[in-house]
Amino acid sequence: MLLSLLLANSADVSAVHAEGTTEAGRSEQAVEEPGRSEFIAAMRRVRERTAEPPDPDTLKRFPIYDYLVAARLRRDLAAMPDEPLDSKIDRFVSAHAGQPVTRALRSEWLTSLASRARWDWFLPRATELNSAQLICDRLAGRLATGDKQGLATEALARWGLAQRPPPECEPVFAWLRGQGLLTAALAEKRTRTALEAGNPRLAREFVADVPADAAAPLLLWTRLLETPKPVLQALASQPAMDVEPTALEAGFSKLARTDSAAALEVLPGLLSRPGLAPELRGRLQRAAALGAAYDHDPQAIAAFVRLPADAVDADVRDWRVRAALWAGDFQRALAWIAQMPAAQAAEPRWRYWRARAVAATSGAKAAEPLFADVAGLRDFYGYLAADRIRSDYQLNAHPSTAVDSEQRELAARPGLIRAHALFDCDMTDDAIAEWSVALANTSAAIRLQAALLAADWGWYAQSISTLAQVGELDDVRLRYPRPYPEAIAQASRLTHLPPDWILAVMRQESLFRSDAVSPAGARGLMQMQPRTAAAVDRRWHLGARASAMSSEPGFDPSSDVKLGAAYLRELLDRYDGQLELSLAAYNAGPVPVSRWLPPKAMDADIWIENIPYGETRSYVQRILEHIVAFAWVRGAQPPRLSTLLPRVVPASISAQAARRPVANDPPSSGPQHPRRPVRASGAGPALQPS
């Protein structure tokens, strides 16, 4: 029913409010800039290594022609480097010193020079390096050319880092070894650095250089990080067993995060070990209490109560309130909020929960002014508070003012001209680099005008991120554009999801960048992992060729949006339409969400507050905010969070829903999709509780 009402209210609005924009968000009425089509075709020939005709004058005058020249030089460098090409690249890099167009070319050229041992070319130009490989190349080059002044100090600093060195460092490390400079003390320090960074695999490699007597405690530390439970059980039952305090704390913290029940079980034995410093005792108790709260363990409240005062920090203050809310102990939650420092208690989150706790302990009338104090905010807690007192949502929207003279000056800057052209040619990373250089050291007022300019170009990601950087958050219409109208309309018809929901996920996942690729490998507008996208495509028989399904270059917004919407639809079906569970699973994966389901029905705001992964908690809250904003921007009455978020059902009911057989054919009407058996395939990022 909820989806039916939302769909009816938002039917076809995406297309209406995005009128005049293409799928990429650029104006359909914009005149094709001379040289753009030639540039795109020429870049394609470079990638495909096909024959090239002479460049026409329109192409040579195109603002980013230099990027074509750089691409050709990079292609030739990969194919057949030689001294004439080195000279040509040197002239180009010198002529464009400090400009983004040279960055990739310079890095690849320096790598090529080092691989050819052209130290006479490499060393004078190997300055301001941020690549570990090139830094090691420079060390190797200095060694090869006899430049050893200060070399040992620089090489030892590189050797001691808690990271696996690139092969290029081996010659200079071998020299250090031959000089007798890699001492046992330094090897031990290096191993400790790796352990302190939480990298036991690297520590096992480094410890091979440590003498056996000094290696023993380091190997125990390594085992504590690799398999903390059995080692901690041994330490708890054998008080005489030696362990370094830092290693004990690291292993116990790891266990508390991964198996809080086991951590609580071994804690008494660890606390009884002789000679344990009071500060360490407090830190162990803190880790155990936080781990229990992350896992929603009923023992969490008692663990927080036992904490010594000096072990209470901001995280403890946050999570003990959350644990009390999960347990339904509003009196304790209110008392713990009262113990927060003023700045922490003044956060909208805790102002809202104070009002909720007062309502639960003293009645709605007593809480009404507290809710009213939060209800005017344009955020998740403001909307929740407004629902509690049945007041309208306050979007507090104020449009930004465009200053024509500043807009014209910005539009004429060479760097921004190049940024615009690069964006129009789908070279977004290069466009961002040009944008950053062009606006470096400019005032917030100028960057605000640049954000308006980017919005006019249809470069929504840059516009929105720049508005956030300058703190201009009240221009709600500018921050919530509606690009890709056709793709969203098609996905909405396919999945029977409201367009606003699809837009909200897209905005949070990729900020409307069709070429977005996350560090974890998620791709496209809806940021799906290739395996998940391929599985969804098979289940829905879409025959999609989406960027999300491949690690190869190339992005297909239409397919990406359909697949992301289809996956969200599957999650909604899996969780009986519970939006908050579905969004959490989209971000973190269904497996963690299955661990977070409550044992009995629970208010959705309490469940969301207790999501252990800070990123996922914020993700769910932000998307709900986006849904409200997108409705407001198109002139509709925003949906109430109280409507979107009914109570979270117990784990047993959700498990039954996940196992429930589903029909192969859609019903004749209603907000359903061609249902198919749902098999969890999403793999969320490796997130830490916070």
Image (cartoon, rainbow, N blue to C red):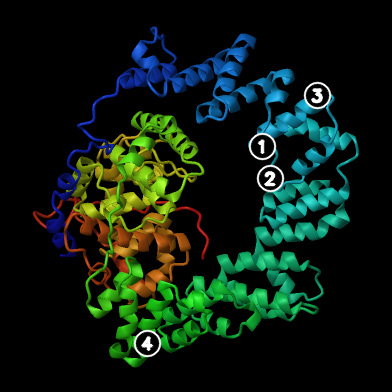
**Res 126 → quadrant:** top right
- 627 in relation to 437, above or below: below
Instruction: Residue under label 3, please give it.
Output: 144
Q: Amino acid at mark 2?
A: Gln
Nearer-N-terminus badge (2/3): 3
Instruction: Residue under label 2, please give it.
Output: 163
Residue 512 lies, in percent from the top left, at: 33, 44
Residue 315 lies, in percent from the top left, at: 55, 72
Q: Amino acid at mark 3?
A: Ala
- 305 in relation to 181, above or below: below
The answer to whether mark 1 and mark 2 are in CB contact below 8 A is yes
**Res 476 → quadrant:** bottom left
| Nearer to us: label 1 or label 2 | 1
Residue, x 81% and y 22% (percent of image)? 145
Instruction: Residue under label 4, please give it.
Output: 358
Question: Disc 1 versus disc 2: distance between alpha carbons?
Answer: 10 Å
The answer to whether mark 1 and mark 3 are in CB contact below 8 A is no
Q: Amino acid at mark 1?
A: Ala
Question: Disc 1 versus disc 4: distance between alpha carbons?
Answer: 56 Å
Residue 328 located left or right of residue 658: right
Nearer-N-terminus badge (4/3): 3
Q: Residue lying at the far bottom in this picture: please name it.
A: 362
